[in-house]
Amino acid sequence: MATVDLTQFHKTFFEESLEGLDAMEAALLALDSGSTDHELVHTIFRAAHSIKGGAATFGFADVAAFTHVAESLLEEVRSGRRAVDAGLIDLLLRSVDCLRAMLDRTSQGRPAADAGSEALRAELARLVEGEAAKAPAATPAKAAAVAGWGIRFVALPHLLQTGNEPLRLFRELQQLGRLEVVRAFVADGAPADFAALDPGQCYLGWELRLHGEVARAALDAVFEWLDGDCELAVAPLAAADAEPVVAPPAPPAAAAAAEAPASARESAAAGGAGHADGGSIRVGIDKVDALIDMMGELVITQSMLSNIGANFDLSQLERLREGLAQLERNTRELQDSVMRIRMLPIGSVFNRFPRLVRDLERKLGKQVKLELHGEHTELDKTVLEKIGDPMVHLVRNAIDHGLEMPEQRRAAGKPDTGTLTLDAHHEGGNIIVRISDDGAGLNHERIRAKAVERGLVSSGQQLSDDEIAELIFQPGFSTAAQATDLSGRGVGMDVVRRNVRDLGGSVGVKSVAGKGSVFTIALPLTLAIIDGLVTAVGSERYIVPLISIVESLRLAPDAVRRIAGGGEVFQFRGEYLPIIHLHRAFNCAGAVTEIGRGIVVVVEDEGQRVGLLVDELVGQQQAVIKSLEKHYERVQGVSGATIVSDGSVALIVDVGGVVRLGRRSKAA
């Protein structure tokens, strides 16, 4: 029987281990000093135990060894032998961080352990050993137990079907001490005829000796999940029994257990989770059911159209039209169902911030209350993965620059504890994320002075508070008096804006001195599909995202003014906007060059507007975006390409890029 390649399950192990660490961190942050919340403690213990078992199964010995020591410490908390205090919570949070780093190195094929992880493991071990030293003197029977344990373990036939596997258990035991296989045997009830053996059943038993000073609780934890799946007898070894012996080679029966049926091993290694080389998404059963229903509707429609096609005559024309309309509806609903599968709650991003806020509170000596709203708001997985870093920048800046020290807040008539709020909700075709604080707000005078010093604005230039606030997004702009490891190094807010723009979104800020600031991020629900306006420029087609369009209009020739440098502007709702000729920007032949003969599409990006000159408007269409970078290269002013209804290729306009081009033209 061939062995199973466990490397195919590594990705699932890493994903589930990281989820377990997230659960550990959330539970630790919810624990208070002196807490007796057994459910939280049990959640932390089970997560550590699962990671240890998986690491041992896949041979990640360093990860298993670290989690074993952490688990021993957690067992003392769970059994009531150790009280929860702030120092213990800090130590366990550091252990979570260390395990994340170890898993990251392991996933890259690098050694998991380093000097930092070994030092922390030693610190955990000293704490556990110190507790053992404080334990009351053992009775003679218990004193003999430290020499080791005798174990009789007989698998019940259905054990493999529960996702358990003897080989994994033995690996876990080897993490506790030196494991000796005394003998392996066929359990009672096994079929006498080899041909009658069911490969999904287990008929094996083992007599084992575990040598070393192993706590009974640690031993019980290994077999914790086998209740009802095996016969187990454990007894302390006498000193004579614990003398070192040479373990015999694994007998054929043990080797057979190592070649357990693939289905059982897959269940044990993957925990029943699906696996895919390109990544995985956990999908609610309701979304899968909706997708299956849509497929059923499509099959019915396809069958109807096939029947019409096989027996078509003009009398069936109306039925054909109805069938095509039904096909269009089904296709749109199927598209919506498929897109919903990629949608995940933003709570997975929000969940990282309680830990960040706690750490910054302690580092800066501030008091912060974090409020989270709209955690169940969903957006595309790709957007979700990329929005985390910009939000971390904004949260760190809000705590470091925005919220005042307790004494400063007291003097301003505010409570000592500042409030930081993260809110997410849907608005039109976008998701809006707001990061707001009740701190000091932006120092508009200092920002303006810094901008004048750097030559971004002239000393006599009149700017509104909103325009001054926008200056913080300039590259390298900072008003910090001195650099810290949190902010003030002249980088950050420009990076936030660039990262959000790369997602097709925008970021802005509103601030009131003494009251606080609100940073607003607008993001598309998905990066895969947009609603767009198809425009013609010469023989080419360009799609402008509807979300960026303010208005489309024809301009009379006398409504356009020329400015120095050859640029053109027109008046629109009380302001002059630059005109961008798309045929010049994209070098299109045969396009309309006279503004009066074309159509100007007014678009907006981050509060800035320009007019795009196109030949004509073709119509509205949903566009499935295809990246040019993947197949060609990055093109300035173009965010991707798509196929329009007539089968031709159309480029999708990067509105932010052309607005920035228009801004430069206006400045010229």
Image: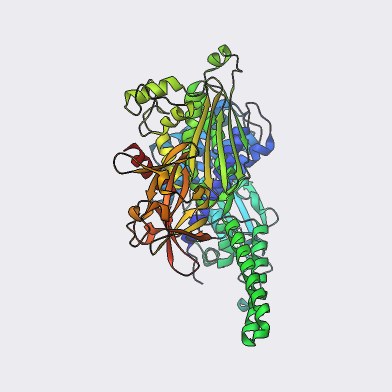
**Height in image: 652 above or below 141?**
below
404 relative position to 494: left or right: right
Image quarter in which the C terminus is found = top left
User: Could you tell me residue 145's position as x and y percent?
Assistant: 60, 41
Observer-nearest of 661 and 665: 665
Q: In the depicted view, which residue is nearer to us: 37 or 619?
A: 619
Above or below — where is 245 with respect to 642? above
What residue is shown at x 54% (from left), y 35% (from top)? 353
Instruction: Report x, y in % for residue 248.
Output: 48, 59
Q: Residue furthest front?
A: 558
Q: Residue furthest top?
A: 411
With 473 as the anchor, is 509 left or right in this view?
A: right
At which x and y percent is residue 349?
54, 42
Q: Is residue 54 visible?
A: no
Specify the farthest residue to the right.
228
User: Which of the pair 599/529 is nearer the observer?
Assistant: 599
Q: Name the residue at 49% across, 45% down.
A: 505
